[in-house]
Amino acid sequence: MKKGQDTRGYERYMALDIHREYILVGAWNEEKDWVLTPRRVSIEKFPEWAKKNIRPGDIVVLETTTNVWTIYDIVAPLASRVLVANAAEVGEIANARVKTDKEDINRLLKLVVGGIVPEVWVPPVAVRELRAFVSYRHRLVKTSTMIRNRLQSLLHKHNLMLSEAGLLDQAWWEAQKNISSLEKMQIRQELSLLQEVEKLKDAVDEELQRQSTSTMWGKQAVQIMQLPGVGFVVAMTVLSAIGDISRFENAKQLVGYAGIGAGVHDSGKTHKEKKITKKGRRELRWAMVEAAWRAVRMSPFWKAEYEKHLERMRKPNQAIVVVARKLLVAIWHVLSKEETDIHASEDDLAYKMLLLSWSLNEDVRMGLTYKQFAKYALMKLGVETDVTRFMRKNVPRRLAPRDEVLARMTELGLSA
């Protein structure tokens, strides 16, 4: 939360309380007298109303809601300044027992006149679109999980063991004699829906792959994906949540933004760490925990970190959160300082980039072979040594030479 904002000297202080079907608007002058008494404006008519009523000299405050950025984009070109307030923190500050539209307007106006709006960062359009796309993928995964759980419940109900083909084996389901005709109809529809959802998710994942090598996100995505446990889905989720790494002065701020910093109770001589705050972006917490579990399986360093904290905490979920927090600190360093992973050798990085290239579709690799793309990614990370051969899991691995990749990049019109 930003304290001591300079919000004095504006002609009007305007608050917008956004609802699904209407927006309640109201405004004070600097002496806190009403210059625009609270009134409702329908969502459909708001763009026209805003053009006629919001003018230079106004400072406008609105709270984060589902459609806040649509309203923000309408208001921002008209007013001198627009502040977007964190709705959760506004509620904590107000701690109001009575909640009405007019009281909401009063609270927002008091905060903006007092210069204590708990302001949030306004993400550029590209970040908003990526966030929405990542959120859409999450909904597809959630839908898929719900369908699978319903099918699993039928298995448990009838005490059945699946065939080796798994849940999608429709012929196996049809052959089960103790499943009723009504249940079989449900199963057929569930399987059809599951197959369609999986196709949609695959298409979304292909687009996330493309975004991870795009001009907009490619460099940052590769920097994150050099870390163990971070694939293109986690990388794009992290980037959508962070947006601009420069707004975090240090790694501690980024950890707090994710809500995986430990709460602390200080009283007298007592200092006790509590559970994580969970006050932050939920998808960023998910991504870091997901990456942490994978990193523990892939990397000796992160496995040792996990085991060290597990021995002390005795709880796997708490130990993995510590690893997730440390991994997020590493992400801050590789993004803000463009560093390479300090816990990885050049061979480790080469293998990680080779794994990455194997996971990408041919068109996403932009015309490069697996070996060429892995070298291309290493070059993006600033690795100067021309690693072309190394051993991993007792198997010789190869990357294309730098000169070959540079020549191919010239042919394809790719930037270095």
Image (cartoon, rainbow, N blue to C red):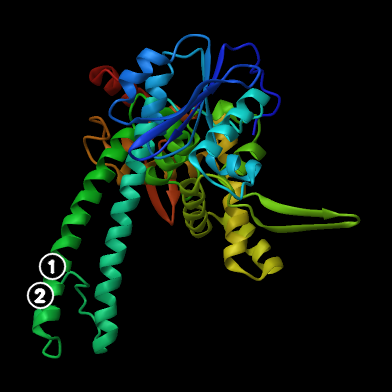
Q: What is the distance, in whole Å, between disc 2 and disc 1 at their CAs?
A: 6 Å
x%, y% of residue 319? Answer: 62, 62
- Point out the image quarter for the C terminus: top left
x%, y% of residue 69? Answer: 40, 30
| Residue 416 seen in render | no
The residue tagged 2 is: 185
Q: Secondary structure at mark 1?
A: helix
In the rendered structure, the answer to whether residue 346 lies left or right of residue 380 reads right
- Point out the image quarter for the N terminus: top right
Does the residue at mark 2 contact the one at mark 1 (Cβ under 8 Å)? yes
x%, y% of residue 142? Answer: 33, 58
Q: Nearer the viewer, residue 85 or 167?
A: 85
**Of the residues shown, which amino acid type is indicated by label 1?**
Gln
x%, y% of residue 146? Answer: 30, 65
**Of the residues shown, which amino acid type is indicated by label 2?**
Met
The residue tagged 1 is: 189
Q: Residue at x 32, y 31 (%)?
A: 43
| Residue 245 seen in render | yes
- Give above or below for 256 relative to 119: below
